């Protein structure tokens, strides 16, 4: 009998909770070794910009997309701007809002590393069949929904 089968539901929840942090740390360390020019967190920021429905998302919009503070996003964006990967500009309608746009250098950099990223993903998810991938994806979506509900409840309690 596997170790997982011997765990009750509460033990499984505790295991998953702890394992998410461990996996996150390991993924960050591994991802940071992929590219000397950008960290995995910077990659996530750039990916959020390219997947955003807005052509030039604001610092706040990026922050909401990647789940980190506005200050962290601004700090990363400033570093990426120094490297020539993004341009930060004031919103034409509200000078308090900073918008982030990927540069041609950024687009070319990601085009050049596309095959490396595909290989990384293939290795990372090696051995996970379609059903397991689908279940993992659905589970993460539900966890994200639950976190959003908990955040809203916490915000309401603080008001």
Image (cartoon, rainbow, N blue to C red):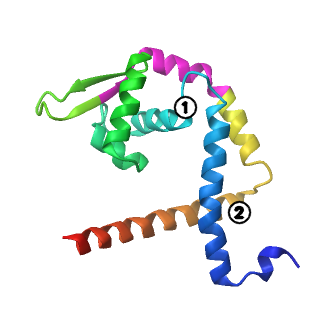
70 or 146, nearer to the observer: 70
Task: Look at mark 1 in the image and give the residue it sits on.
Answer: 39
Residue positioned 76% across, 41% down in the render: 123
- Which residues fall within the magenta stretch? 100-115
Task: Look at mark 2 in the image and give the residue it sits on.
Answer: 131
Give the structural element (helix, strand or loop) at label 1.
Answer: loop
Q: Is residue 131 left or right of residue 75?
A: right
Q: Quadrant of the C terminus?
A: bottom left
Q: Position of residue 31 (x, y in %)?
A: 63, 36
Residue positioned 39% across, 17% down in the render: 82
Q: Position of residue 129 (x, y in %)?
A: 76, 57
Q: Position of residue 132 (x, y in %)?
A: 71, 62
Q: Is residue 30 above or below residue 114?
A: below
Rendered image quadrant of residue 27: top right
User: Counting other residues with Cα less than 10 Å from the Cα at mark 1, is it few (<14), some (14-19), or many (20 or more)?
Assistant: some
Report the number of numbered marks. 2
Rendered image quadrant of residue 134: bottom right
Residue positioned 37% across, 70% down in the render: 149
Residue positioned 46% across, 15% down in the render: 105
Q: Is residue 132 above or below residue 153?
A: above
Q: Nearer the viewer, mark 1 or mark 2?
A: 1
């Amino acid at each position: 009998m596997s170790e997982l089968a011997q765990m009750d539901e509460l033990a499984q929840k505790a295991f998953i909770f702890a394992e998410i942090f461990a996996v996150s740390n390991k993924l960050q360390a591994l991802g940071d070794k992929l590219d000397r020019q950008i960290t995995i967190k910077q990659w996530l920021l750039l990916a959020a910009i390219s997947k955003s429905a807005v052509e030039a998302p604001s610092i706040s919009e990026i922050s909401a997309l990647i789940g980190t503070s506005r200050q962290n996003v601004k700090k990363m964006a400033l570093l990426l701007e120094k490297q020539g990967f993004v341009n930060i500009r004031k919103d034409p309608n509200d000078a308090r809002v900073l918008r982030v746009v990927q540069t041609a250098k950024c687009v070319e950099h990601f085009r050049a590393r596309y095959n490396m990223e595909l290989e990384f993903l293939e290795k990372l998810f090696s051995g996970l069949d379609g059903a397991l991938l689908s279940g993992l994806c659905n589970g993460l979506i539900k966890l994200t929904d639950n976190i959003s509900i908990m955040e809203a409840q916490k915000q309401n309690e603080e008001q």
